[in-house]
Image (spheres, coloured by chain):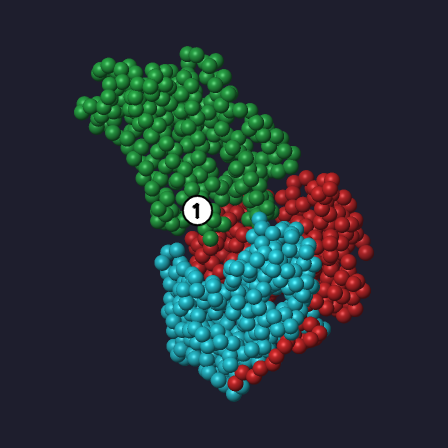
Chain colours: A red, B green, C cyan
């Protein structure tokens, strides 16, 4: 396949923190190719390096070795990182810590326009913010003058998505977008993400520890462990026919209502009524 | 915000703020109603308290109460100025290094540590002695501020550094904000309550430092200060003469002011620091 | 006889600004010897307050509004804190707290914290006996007792720390253990090990009954024999594990189950259940069903009639229309 139909390409990318004895290798020699317009998930337990890798794709961290390409060109080729952020954006895990507690939500959504080469007029900015809010099922007048702590977690998570509707990037890095959202709202978030993908023809990179979520949304899953990608492939392949021991262990350890997980019954059964 | 309500309910805050308010009134409001005269000799040196002069006279025969009030005002002014200078300098250096990290942070930390290691009192003594004539209140405050900033810098730097990793800062970065923009909008607001507490402590420290310098006779030439009153008491051997009004009131005032500020600071920490709130 | 009986328990707490939040609003259940009851609920449903309530720990701003909690027939709800600490906490009922990893004092060695637990029950035990007891117990739960007892928390990995916390909490062989989200901060492999450990403790009769609280229903499938689903301070469905998970009657239960994503073939086509809105504010009195605002099958009179927990055939449900 010609190189530029890959959104991202990595060749032996590593990220090392610290020096000498206290050195930590967060990402170790990873290589992959992410196809344009696909959804991939980086799956692994905390500490496996998935967040650091995602930050490198987001240009918030730089690799200490190896080559990382975006749209066929080295990721740092463009000196102004703002150009990268016009095309690659993110939603974060904790919607409350992702926003500044001192400014209103509306003001913070408008601050996204800072990224534009040419800032639109005041009226147009207001209009676009309103439109973005409607896209995530929030009535614009409902959040007027409100600060982040006045809204619920589910609503704040939708604000992060509304921001993406404003910025319209080609790529979205979603770092555990549903882990801090209560179960009932989870599906909503996923629905908005799929809506975004369809409307903007985006490439999405999910970062998650939940393999069920990864299975549901992805075209490809990368299993990470201790900084390395130990397995990659389409969801069915990774979950049904895993080849790596880590993957197998992960699948066996995830509690699932349908299969025998623990290998034994709880001590006593009881009737209720 | 709602935190201020909690502050007003805290007994420590009320005690400290109340005491400090009293000293402010004594230093700035009382002179409007009372005749504060630090020039006229009204009697002999170290005359004991009487009906006309509640705290007697000082080593020059001037009304001690007037001297105390004037001294208190100077001490408060110096403390405030020194505190402001130390806090502003320290915050600028601390926030910049803390946020930027890397090489800049290393250089600034090295500089801060160098300054920290220099014994500030000795520097102040040297500076003061070198300036025989021109030692004004303002200059003293400037010297103190320029040697005390290191503590604020370290404290603020640690806070700024921990804020750097927060998600809202990352969001601001991918919104294309510059370093200055991020520091002003996303780091400083979160540090304001902390910086204010630092300022209170720096003011208290400034008052104490000025008192120390003045007690060594290196205080301001052009005005009275509480430390100077103590210096004069020592120089005139008021202690051996049993003239307690020569030094006890001055010491009490210094103690009360500094104590009040410390208590306010502790109360604020209890309210502002979420970990202590539990 | 039931080991733990909770009768119409209502617990509230007072916020800094004077509001009264009725976090637990009428919970009744009983725990038999040898039973594991699972409580499923999301953050804000009142489960953590319920834990404090069951332990008899009413420390301001938490207050008992009304109701009773009995352990082996003895009421503990109105005991003074001193009496509670001496006679109940740790011995009759113990808690494994949420975020257990952070509940270990970083400046003390494990053996010191563990000794405190023993000394709180009986001040006269001598250090040598204490140490031997600790060693025996820690060995029994699969830890290298000598190494672990003499370490500081920071020297131990997360999985070991969790074991230590469980070990210390169950040191006095409490009859009832309440585990509040004991596995939420752990990776899946450690999670499994922790649950296995809890089962071993039950097998060996070190603990006899357990309440396991979590928002992850799949865990409860393998852990509990019965499940109570909690929402907005009340139980909304109580039944056996199979009933609640595979045949939930209450719309909220179904929503919880439906929102699970699992890595099974064929799951990609199933659209997960989505519900708008958020749980109600418990600072104000609520009329009618607390789920009515968000219920996908809400009926006209749901918001006006208070729903009681009734027995519908083989389980308890708090919904007029569940059948």
Up/down of A258 relative to B269, above or below: below
Foreground residue, A112 or A130?
A112
Looking at the picture, how far across and down is residue A263, in whole percent? 71, 74
Up/down of A107 relative to C253, above or below: above
Camera sees residue A90 = no
Image quarter where the N terminus of chain A lies is bottom right
Up/down of B18 relative to A232, above or below: above
Image-based side of A125 in relation to B6, left or right: right
Which of the 4 quarters of the picture holds residue B259?
top left
Most distant residue in the bottom direction: C313
Q: How many marks?
A: 1
Most distant residue in the left direction: B51
| SS state under label 1 | helix
Looking at the picture, how far across and down is residue A182, in whole percent? 55, 65
Image-based side of C92 in relation to B82, left or right: right
Residue visible at 57% across and 63% down in the picture: C169
Residue visible at 69% across and 69% down in the picture: C263
Camera sees residue C224 = yes
Image-based side of C76 in relation to B38, left or right: right
**Label 1 Cα neighbours within 10 Å, binned few <14 / some 14-19 / many ≥20:** some
Up/down of B117 relative to A31, above or below: above
Q: Chain of mark 1?
A: B
Residue visible at 61% across and 57% down in the picture: C128
Foreground residue, C269 or C58?
C58
Foreground residue, B115 or C269?
B115
Looking at the picture, how far across and down is residue A205, in whole percent? 68, 57
Looking at the picture, how far across and down is residue C48, in whole percent? 50, 65
Residue of label 1:
B270
């Amino acid at each position: 396949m010609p190189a530029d139909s890959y959104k991202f390409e990595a060749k032996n990318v590593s990220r090392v923190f610290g020096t000498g004895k206290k050195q930590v290798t967060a990402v170790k020699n990873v290589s992959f190719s992410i196809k344009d317009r696909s959804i991939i998930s980086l799956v692994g337990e905390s500490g496996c390096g998935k967040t650091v890798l995602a930050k490198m794709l987001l240009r918030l961290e730089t690799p200490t070795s190896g080559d990382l390409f975006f749209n066929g060109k080295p990721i740092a080729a463009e000196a102004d990182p703002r150009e990268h952020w016009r095309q690659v954006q993110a939603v974060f895990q904790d919607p409350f810590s992702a926003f500044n507690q001192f400014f209103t939500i509306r003001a913070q959504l408008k601050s996204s326009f800072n990224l534009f080469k040419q800032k639109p007029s005041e009226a147009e900015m207001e209009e676009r913010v309103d439109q973005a809010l409607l896209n995530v099922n929030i009535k614009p007048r409902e959040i007027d003058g409100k600060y982040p702590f006045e809204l619920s977690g589910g609503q704040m998570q939708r604000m992060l998505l509304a921001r993406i509707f404003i910025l319209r990037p080609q790529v979205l890095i979603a770092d555990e977008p549903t882990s801090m959202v209560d179960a009932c709202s989870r599906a909503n978030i996923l629905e908005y993400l799929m809506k975004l993908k369809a409307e903007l023809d985006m490439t999405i990179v999910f970062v998650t520890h939940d393999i069920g979520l990864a299975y549901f949304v992805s075209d490809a899953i990368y299993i990470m462990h201790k900084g390395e990608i130990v397995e990659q492939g389409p969801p069915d392949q990774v979950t049904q026919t895993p080849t790596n021991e880590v993957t197998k262990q992960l699948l066996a350890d995830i509690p699932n209502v349908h299969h025998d997980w623990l290998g034994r019954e709880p001590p006593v059964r009881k009737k209720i009524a | 915000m709602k935190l201020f309500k909690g502050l007003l309910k805290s007994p420590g805050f009320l005690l400290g703020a109340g005491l400090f308010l009293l000293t402010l009134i004594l230093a700035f409001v009382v002179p409007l109603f009372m005749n504060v005269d630090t020039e006229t000799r009204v009697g002999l040196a170290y005359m004991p308290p009487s009906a006309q002069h509640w705290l007697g006279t000082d080593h020059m025969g001037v009304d001690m109460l007037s001297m105390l009030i004037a001294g208190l005002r100077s001490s408060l002014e110096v403390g405030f100025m020194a505190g402001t200078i130390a806090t502003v300098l320290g915050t600028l250096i601390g926030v910049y290094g803390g946020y930027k990290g890397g090489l800049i942070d290393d250089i600034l930390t090295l500089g801060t540590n160098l300054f920290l290691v220099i014994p500030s009192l000795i520097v102040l003594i040297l500076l003061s002695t070198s300036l025989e004539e021109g030692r004004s209140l303002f200059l003293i405050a400037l010297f103190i501020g320029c040697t005390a900033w290191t503590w604020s810098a370290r404290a603020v730097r640690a806070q700024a550094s921990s804020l750097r990793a927060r998600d809202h800062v990352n969001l601001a970065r991918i919104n294309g904000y510059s370093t200055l923009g991020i520091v002003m909008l996303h780091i400083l607001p979160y540090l304001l309550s902390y910086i204010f507490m630092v300022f209170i402590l720096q003011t208290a420290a400034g008052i104490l430092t000025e008192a120390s310098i003045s007690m060594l006779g290196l205080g301001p030439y052009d005005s009275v200060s509480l430390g100077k009153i103590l210096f004069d008491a020592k120089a005139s051997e008021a202690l051996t003469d049993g003239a307690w009004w020569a030094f006890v009131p001055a010491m009490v005032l210094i103690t009360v002011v500094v104590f009040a500020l410390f208590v306010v600071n502790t109360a604020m920490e209890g309210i502002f620091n979420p970990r202590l709130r539990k | 006889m039931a080991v733990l009986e909770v009768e119409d328990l209502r617990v509230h707490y007072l916020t800094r600004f004077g509001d009264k939040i009725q976090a637990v609003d009428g919970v009744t259940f009983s725990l038999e010897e040898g039973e594991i009851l699972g409580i499923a609920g999301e953050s804000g449903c009142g489960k953590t307050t319920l834990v404090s309530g069951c332990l008899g720990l009413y420390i301001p701003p938490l207050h008992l509004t009304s109701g009773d909690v009995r352990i082996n027939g003895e009421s503990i709800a109105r005991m003074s804190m001193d009496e509670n600490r001496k006679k109940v906490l740790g011995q009759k009922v113990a808690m494994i707290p949420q975020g257990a990893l952070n509940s270990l004092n970083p400046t003390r060695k494990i053996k010191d914290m563990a000794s405190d637990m023993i000394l709180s029950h009986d001040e006269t035990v001598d250090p040598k006996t204490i140490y031997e007891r600790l060693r025996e117990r820690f060995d029994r739960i699969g830890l290298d007792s000598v190494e672990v007892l003499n370490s500081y928390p920071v020297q131990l990995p997360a999985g070991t720390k969790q074991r230590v916390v469980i070990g210390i909490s169950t040191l006095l062989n409490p009859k009832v253990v309440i585990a509040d989200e004991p596995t939420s901060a752990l990776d899946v492999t450690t999670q499994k090990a922790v649950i296995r450990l809890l089962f071993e403790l039950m097998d060996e009769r070190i603990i006899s009954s357990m309440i396991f609280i979590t928002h992850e229903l799949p865990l409860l499938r393998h852990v509990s024999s019965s499940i109570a689903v909690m929402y907005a301070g009340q139980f909304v469905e109580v039944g056996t594990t199979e009933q609640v998970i595979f045949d939930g009657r209450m719309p909220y239960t179904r929503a919880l189950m439906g929102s699970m994503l699992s890595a099974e073939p064929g799951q990609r086509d199933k659209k997960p259940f989505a519900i708008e809105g958020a749980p109600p504010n418990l600072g104000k009195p609520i009329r009618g069903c607390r789920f009515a605002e968000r219920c996908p099958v809400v009926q006209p009179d749901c918001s006006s009639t208070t729903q009681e927990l009734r027995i519908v055939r083989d389980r308890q449900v708090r919904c007029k229309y569940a059948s």
